[in-house]
Each structure stands twice: as structure tokens, then as C-alpha cells.
Image (cartoon, grey):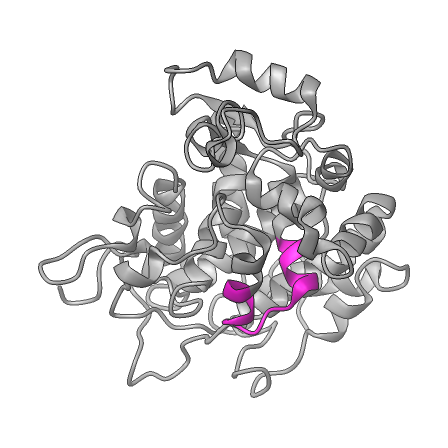
Amino acid sequence: MMTSSSSVSSSTCRSAMRAAAGVVLVVAAALCLPAGTRAQLSGDYYESTCPDAYDIVKQVLVQAHQSDTRIFASLLRLHFHDCFVQGCDGSLLLDSVPGMPSEKTAAPNAGSARGFPVVDAAKAALEAACPGVVSCADILAIAAEISVELSGGPTWCVLLGRLDSKTSDFNGANLLPAPTDNLTVLQSKFNAVNLNDVDLVALSGGHTFGRAQCRFVTSLPDRLYNFSGTGQPDPTLDSAYRDLLAQRCPVNGNASALNDLDPTTPDTFDKNYYSNIEVNRGFLNSDQELKSSPEAQGTTAPIVDQFAGSQDDFFAAFAQSMINMGNIKPLTDPSQGEVRTDCKRVNAS
């Protein structure tokens, strides 16, 4: 393994191995497996072909963050929304072409998915350094880890070697886990991609930073004014928190106005997301469902309790679950995928 200053694998994997001496990332370090395992992904995939890849992406993200404090949370979300639709293959990044509408235009992404210019900037920098080597799908995976780490969260061994798809799936993107989903629906969507309840709770912890629009609490299910048609607010919503949200998201107000997903430490990756849920201060319906749904008792609620009580446990589980998510149907067959030179379009198009 090369020195940490020059290798995408060593920068992430060596950090994970150091942390493994404690409690946090034992599992993450153990899952940094050699090429040929776990769907042919490996931590040192670019060691000889583009050894500075990690540092190149990191430089682009650090610069972007100087003018956009939301960018780290947005890039993590892009990786999530990419992997849940036909696997981690960069399909989300494709623009619409005749006969193939973009996943960007599907309801869960339109008007809310962001960070695409930063991905393009990272791709341009990588093409200048090592043309035709690093896939757009892998850029999303690398950017997600960097975004979490630079926000105070855990690091993990990013397994790499994905190719980019030549297709997108607009209909599949419309079935992404949604902020309006109840727990049963969320569990079904996660199970469909071989992720379990621990993955569901841990990955939902990505809402410990970033922002969300008012429409996610003032449209169905309207948590502030007419929950489930009752004419009353969501009974699981803390009354003081509900009053605060009502000031920021008044009736007939700006549906696109932004609110902190974590009102305590909105730009820091920590366990406060779970502490908020424990006291009924989950912003999204899907967040609070993990604790307050009747179906959560004995399933997701004890996991929320565990993570609220131990940031080490949360960080370890999050690292594990990010590796699990990153291994959802990775495209590694050259007859099916490619390394795009422009993340917005397939090659020679």
C-alpha cells in the first residue's frame, strides 16, 4: 500500500485501520478487501493508475465548501440516491436524452438533488491528471466519504472499481425512499436492495447535517397543520419544535424555504440526529418513524436508542452501512459499463 499522501486507498483505508485500534471502525477496516472480492471492488483499485485520485477529489470538495456549507450533505445524498436506483453506477448523473429521461428529473430529485457541478469539477480535475481512469460512480463514493469525514464523522475504506452505466432509470428514481414514507415502506425499500434495519437507521443518520425544504413537512403527510387529515399537527412532534417549524414554514409560506435537519449541530456529523428523534424532534416523517412508529418497537427503535447513547456505535455502524450500500449491484462488467469522460453523458454521444 502506498503512502497516505498519494493513494486513494491509503488515505481512507489507513485511517480506518488506525481507528480500528479503538472501537469505532473495526468492521470498516476489516471490509477493505483485495481486488476480486465483494463484486470485484477493492480499496486500492486506483493505486497504480491514478494514485492521487482521493486527494484530487478532496481538493475540489474543500474549495466548494468554502462557498457552500451545504455541499457535504448534498454530496452524501447524491451517492445514496445513485446507489438505490439500479445500483451504484453513476446513473443519477446522466442528463436527459430523447427516450431516456434523467433520474435528476424524477420527483425525489427534482428541485432538491444538488452538487452536480462539484462532481463535474472533480471529474474534470481527474481527467486532467489521469484521463479515462476514474469513474463517475467512484467519484460519488469517494466524495461521500470525504464529506462525512470533513464534517466530523467517521472514515472508512472506500471500495472502488465501479464502472458507469450507459442508462438511467427515471421510473426507479421515483421509488426512492421518501421523507413521507412510513416505517414499513422504508423497511421494504431497504430490504429490496439487501439492506437491513441497522442499515436503515444508520444511513438515515446522514440527516445529522444538511437542510430540507418546508414542503417536506407541510405537504403530505402535513406534520404541522393537518396530519393524516385530522386538522391537527403530527402528535409525535414535540410542541415547542412544532412551533419553531410553524414560524419557519407558515401556512401558504415558501415551500422551498430551508430548515436544518438537525437544529442542534446542523453542519456537524454527530449522533445528535438520534438524540433529536428521542425527544420527538425529527424533522422528516421518515426520521421520526424510526422511533415513534408502533412497528419500530423491537425493530428500529432500540437501534435509535443505541446510537443516541453512543456516537462510537453510530459511527461504526454508519461506516459499515456505507460500505454495504456502496456494494449494491456495482457495475464492473466492461461490456455493460464504461468510464465516462463527462459524468453528464455517455461516451461518444
Residue found at the very far top of the displayed protein: 247
- For the point 56% across and 74% down, the residue is 194
Quadrant hosting residue 234 = top right
- Residue 283 location, x and y as percent? 59, 33
Quadrant hosting residue 338 = bottom left
Quarter of the image with the C terminus in it: bottom left
Q: State the extent of the magenta-drawn residues as a range.
A: 188-203
Q: Nearer the viewer, residue 275 or 124?
A: 275
Quadrant hosting residue 93 = bottom left
Most common secondary structure along the magenta stretch? helix
Answer whether residue 101 is magenta in the image. no
- Residue 101 location, x and y as percent? 19, 56
Is residue 59 visible in the rendered structure shown here?
yes
Answer whether residue 191 is magenta in the image. yes
Q: Nearer the viewer, residue 257 or 183?
A: 183
In the displayed structure image, the side of residue 22 where residue 190 appears, left or right: left
Quarter of the image with the N terminus in it: bottom right
Q: Is residue 135 above or below residue 40?
A: above
- For the point 44% across and 50% down, the residue is 78
In the displayed structure image, the side of residue 113 where residue 94 appears, left or right: left
Q: Nearer the viewer, residue 187 or 122?
A: 187
- Residue 336 location, x and y as percent? 29, 81
Q: Is residue 338 above or below residue 154?
A: below
- Residue 124 location, x and y as percent? 34, 51
